Image (spheres, rainbow, N blue to C red):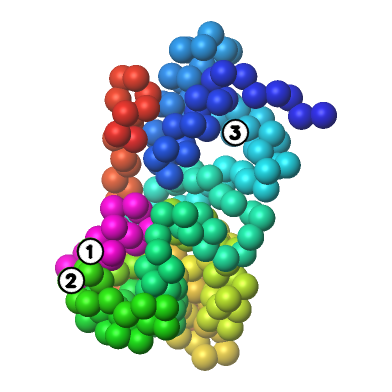
Amino acid sequence: MSRPMGDSHKRFLQTLMSNGIISSIQAKALHRHCCETHGAHYSADRLDEFIDVINANLQPMFMYIRKGMSEEDGVQYYALVNTAETDITRMSSDYADNELELFRKTMDLIVDSENGAASSTDVLNCADSLQTKKMKKKETELVLNKFVQDKWLNEKQGVYTLSTRCIIEMEQYMRLIYQDLIKVCHVCHNVAIQSQICENPTCGIQMHLPCVAIYFKGRSDPLCPACNQFWAHEIPVVTCTLSRPPEANGEAEL
């Protein structure tokens, strides 16, 4: 029988639910705040055990807190995942049918691309082929902005990528829908959308950019960890820019 959640666990879960996703540094600060606020035992190195208690209680509801990595900078994040369905269930209550269809088409473009990204022009063109209800350009732009604000997509200079939240929460969906396209990182074994690929045609393993940076750090002659051929890509320098911790109350503006 699982250990019941205390008020500290419930507060942690409620905060995570309201924010959608939090970085590991935020999770650590929130863990401490929740324990101190409710007089629970706190130990800095027991965050995973703390979350395990929450997950054990969430299991009957087909939900759990999953940890994942940002493909951009390697920062670790926590998100609440729904495991009951393989479709885009978390989004269905927040978006109209044509908005969900636009998101699926955007995801199709990103996953099927060579660089794990889609231009705003390509995404806007998708709005003309929606089966549910077509969108005008201005409406499409507003919906895309909402996807970014709600942390489902990232946008930089007119280029869209899947957010860390999206990859963590949609991994099961993506593995099912994009079976022939989805690859996993050779280093961390998580889904790899933005990645480098071994140019040896008989190999072709993929690695996240942060994983590439860490794996080849300090190596003057980078060789593929699978086939031992020269790794022909430029080795990225990834500097983890950790998100700031929560405010003093542990919950505001996570």
Q: CA distance from mark 2 to mark 3?
A: 42 Å
Query: What secondary structure is found at the residue carrying circle 2?
Result: helix
Disc marking residue 86:
none
Q: Quadrant of residue 175?
A: bottom right
- Residue most extreme to the top: 39
Disc 2 to disc 3: CB gap under 8 Å? no
Which amino acid, mark 3?
A: Ile
The 10 Å Cα crowd at callout 2, few under 14, some 14 to 19, many 20 or more, is few
Disc 3 target residue: 51
Disc 1 target residue: 142
Which amino acid, mark 1?
A: Leu
Q: Which contiguous range is marked in magenta?
A: 143-159
- Residue most extreme to the front: 133
Disc marking residue 138:
2
Quadrant assignment for the C terminus = top left
Relative image position of residue 31 (x, y in whole percent): 48, 25
